[in-house]
Amino acid sequence: MSSILWIAQAKPNPAGKDKTSYGSPKPEQLLGEWVDIENIGTEPVRFSTMKLFHTIFTDKCEPTGRTEDYWSDNGTASLSPGETLRVHTGMKKDESLMSPDDRGAVKWRAFAGKDRFVLNNRCGDAITVTWQDGNGKAWKDTASYRPNAPEGAVLRRAGGNILVPAGAAAGY
């Protein structure tokens, strides 16, 4: 039996994200920034043991060695083998504004509840999910993407720990 989660895909640069450098992003844009966590193991993983982080960078796009909390949950449900959890940056109260593409065909959906974008476009980013298995052992998976992800692109795991636009080479 194994408890294995991985960052399967992410959408770090929803359409129009870079055009909101002033003022607040629209709720539907915040819902369009998301990360999919997939259970590829053989055991369920309780949501209450999962945490999602991303890397903090300097203005020169150098990693600071720090991470920022993106999402965590205290729910009693579990992500079963083969299931996917989509974590949206925005707020649950705005869920009705979500586009069908961002809604996707996932069984589980969570909301980070942020009123700002979290994932980094200019520097790229590294996204990490941590969790505990049924015996309390801690695990983690990290996937990263290069700077300037194409606007509106869904980045998928492409071998190793790299997320790339569908059909693109790792160096997009």
Image (cartoon, helix red, strand yellow):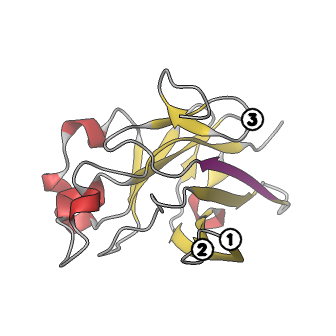
Task: Report which residue position mark 2 lands on.
Answer: 56
Residue 129, image x, y percentages: 65, 57
The one nearer the camera, 3 or 9, is 9
Read off the magenta span: 139-145
Task: Report which residue position mark 1 lands on.
Answer: 63
Task: Report which residue position mark 3 lands on.
Answer: 160
Instruction: Give the amino acid at mark 2.
Output: Ile
Quadrant in which the N terminus appears: top right
Residue 38, image x, y percentages: 58, 40
| Mark 2 surroundings: few (<14), some (14-19) or many (≥20) residues within 10 A | many
- Extreme-top residue of the structure: 167
Q: Residue at x 70, y 52 (%)?
A: 142
Instruction: Give the amino acid at mark 1.
Output: Pro
Residue 111, image x, y percentages: 37, 63
| Looking at the image, residue 101 lies above or below residue 49 | above
Earlier along the polypeptide chain: callout 1 or callout 2? 2
